[in-house]
Amino acid sequence: MNFFLSKKAIVSSVLAIISGAAASQELSLGTYGGSFLESLKACHINAFEKRTGTKVFTKTGNAAQLSASVRATAGKSDFDLLMTDARYVAQLGAQGLLIPIDREKLPNGKRLLTRFQDKNGWYIAFEVAATTIAYDKSQVKVPPTSWYDLLKPEYANKLLVPDVSGPVDGAHFLMSLNRAKGGDGKELNAGFEEIKPFVKSSLVLYTQPDQVVSMFERKEIAAAIWAADRAGVTIDKGLPLGVVYPKEGGVGSLHVMIIPKGSKNVDLALQLIDQMLTPEGQACFAERQYVGPTIADVVVSPKTLDVIPYGKNFDKLWFPDGEVIADNIANWARRWNREVSR
């Protein structure tokens, strides 16, 4: 009798091991690194792993690199889900490299604000970023209200302008000046003329956002055309910075989630997307990363609300056509090198 009980116990143990192995799930996620990934884990991934029993494996890169990886694998992506900038998505979708996302399969999909919904169904927007003016409160007593305030004598050689071949803020600033003068959305002739005095006043043309931090720390600059989220994180580190959405309009961009062709875990990818649309997750991420939520009625602190593109600040944004940027940025960079950079 004891033998049979023992045998049953062994069989039960084996079945439990097999069941546990079958229940173990993995999700491959392409995402941005650094503090972004730390916040992603704290606000979303940890909760998702606990709820589903899934282990999320991450590989980091910037939006261009992650999008290029989808194209390079030609429909056999190693990623189940990845994050990118909305400007890259139209090309990937048109090339048949994405799996459409059915919002009806996302319980929190109904929370997504209408203005952020993709009519083609290729992506789900999870955050809003903005190109703005950051300034040093210890040096600037009267905050700027316009891009053109940065041409005042007090900012000469104390300004930092992004190179158009660097972060997207460079293209955003160029397009914003072009828009302010009623220029064409693709040729940017007006923008290239307008930006020249800003470049002349700029201490250098930065290509990496971290350059801005170090120059503010050393008091080498008094203001910069910079991403609001970068400025917010820097404020939390103790630098006395302020953020201004200029009257011409801060420039908005959407960071999105896409499911590439080749994903082996579409259902799990949808579950992680849904987690990233929860009110608590979006509030957590906004507080840590200073980005705008994409769902309604997210409650954040007044300190965060002053910086992020949400609420009153969102009304000061304009969104350029991301596809136009993706299609023309290489030509703009070549023209920039010929006519503007020094």
Image: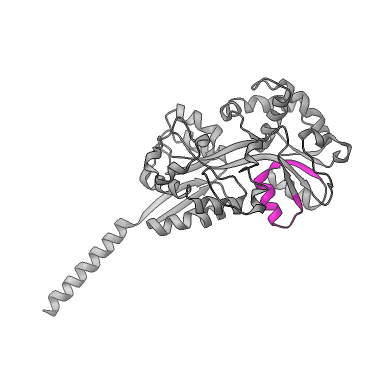
Is residue 140 inside the magenta stretch?
no
- Total labels: the figure holds 0
Please identify the quadrant where the C terminus is shown.
top right
Residue occupying the far right of the picture: 153
Measured as percent of width and height from the top left, residue 275 is found at 45, 50
Identify which residue, 264 or 285, lies in the foreground: 285
Query: Which residue does the image show at 73% across and 34% down from the upper left?
Result: 247
Residue 79 visible at all: no
Query: Which residue does the image show at 48% across and 35% down from the upper left?
Result: 117
Q: Is residue 310 left or right of residue 216?
A: left
Is residue 233 inside the magenta stretch?
yes
Residue occupying the far left of the picture: 1
Q: Is residue 132 left or right of residue 107?
A: right
Identify which residue, 315 or 335, lies in the foreground: 315
Measured as percent of width and height from the top left, residue 299 is found at 56, 52
Query: Which residue does the image show at 42% across and 59% down from the upper left?
Result: 50
Asked if residue 252 is positioned above or below residue 47 in the image, the reply reads above
Choose top left, top right, bottom left or bottom right for residue 109: top left
Measured as percent of width and height from the top left, residue 114 is found at 50, 36
Q: Is residue 139 left or right of residue 229?
A: right
Please identify the quadrant where the N terminus is shown.
bottom left
Residue 294 visible at all: yes
Measured as percent of width and height from the top left, residue 6 is found at 17, 75
Query: Which residue does the image show at 69% across and 44% down from the upper left?
Result: 209
| Colouring of the image | one colour
Per the rendered image, the range of residues in magenta is 221-241
Choose top left, top right, bottom left or bottom right for residue 331: top right
Identify which residue, 79 or 105, lies in the foreground: 105
